[in-house]
Amino acid sequence: MTDDLTYGSYLKIDDLLALQDCRSVDPATGRPEHDETLFIIIHQVYELWFKQLLHEFDHIVGRLDLDQRNAARHHLKRVNKILKTLIAQIDVLETMTPVEFANFRSFLAQASGFQSAQFREIEFVLGVKNRIQLDWFDGNERIRLQERFDSPTLWDAVVRAWFRSGIAVPSEVLERDVREPISESPALQATIIESYDDDGFAALCEMLTDLDTSVQEWRYRHVMMVRRTIGTKPGTGGSDGAAYLQTTLFQPAFPDLWAIRAQF
């Protein structure tokens, strides 16, 4: 049998390159505004990376549930590299001036980054859970988000793995309502500090702290990019724009890993 698979057919390049459907019209040329293509590609690439992040997080949780902590750390390293790539993409987006964005912004209508179901899924995996966000979606997106909302978080998988390894994880941490945001546990912090002499344990904690740092760095860069592009204007889709995004800053996903820093 002749295998006619090619680079283009395997990656569906023709389909991929047909997905940049600009909606704007430059009145001077009759063609789409130049910078809309960049805007679309950047956000489509974000969604592809979000898909990969969810794929990795599910794998990491699976490895932790099987007590394969080395494999989990390996894939957390990959996640952190992906997040650095997401942050670097903002450098590209920031080359677009406020005037260039304004030239096509009105054509976005009600479309908004707030409507990214995959990003909300990532937040839910990390324990940043808000029931209100479920009301922003319907259909298959709502079903996916509800499943993520009702499921244990990455942090829950970590502490369960610690418990199975013999670490004294407090019962209130193990039995917490996984639909609620993760809150600090002084008792767990004491246990974490006692276990930090174990290199494997400490490496996992530091990898998770790196993950948390990268997410917070992405949020900060995103806020600043929005501020320099639209200032204090409301965001598309009726969102509060930079004002809302600023409320998400400096809210760690793993608060216990930050609280212990002052206790060594």
Image (cartoon, helix red, strand yellow):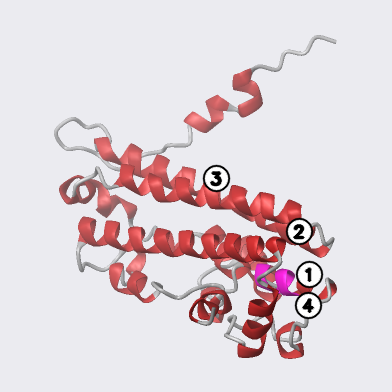
Q: Residue shown at 37%/61% (left/top)?
A: 110
Residue labelled with disc 2: 69
Secondary element at image label 1: helix
Residue ID for mark 1: 161
Residue under pointer 3: 48
Query: Which residue has dot 4 on it?
Result: 167
Alpha carbon separation for disc pair 2 and 1: 8 Å
Mark closer to the observer (4, 3)? 4
* Mark 2–mark 4 CB contact (< 8 Å): no
Mark 3 or mark 2: name the one nearer the start of the chain. 3
- Circles 4, 3 touching at the beta carbon (< 8 Å): no
User: What amino acid is found at the position of numbered circle 3 in the picture?
Assistant: Leu
Residue 11 horizontal/vertical position (percent): 61, 28
Please name the residue shown 66% across and 71% down the image. Answer: 196
* Relative image position of residue 131 (x, y in whole percent): 56, 80
Q: Which residues are magenta?
A: 154-159
Disc 3 residue crowd, few under 14, some 14–19, many 20+, Cα 10 Å: few
**If you read the primary sequence from the N terminus, does the residue marked by circle 2 or circle 1 appear first?**
2
User: Which of marks 4 and 2 precedes in the sequence?
Assistant: 2
Q: Nearer the viewer, mark 2 or mark 4?
A: 4
Mark 4 is on which residue type?
Answer: Ile
Marks 2 and 1 close (CB-CB < 8 Å): yes
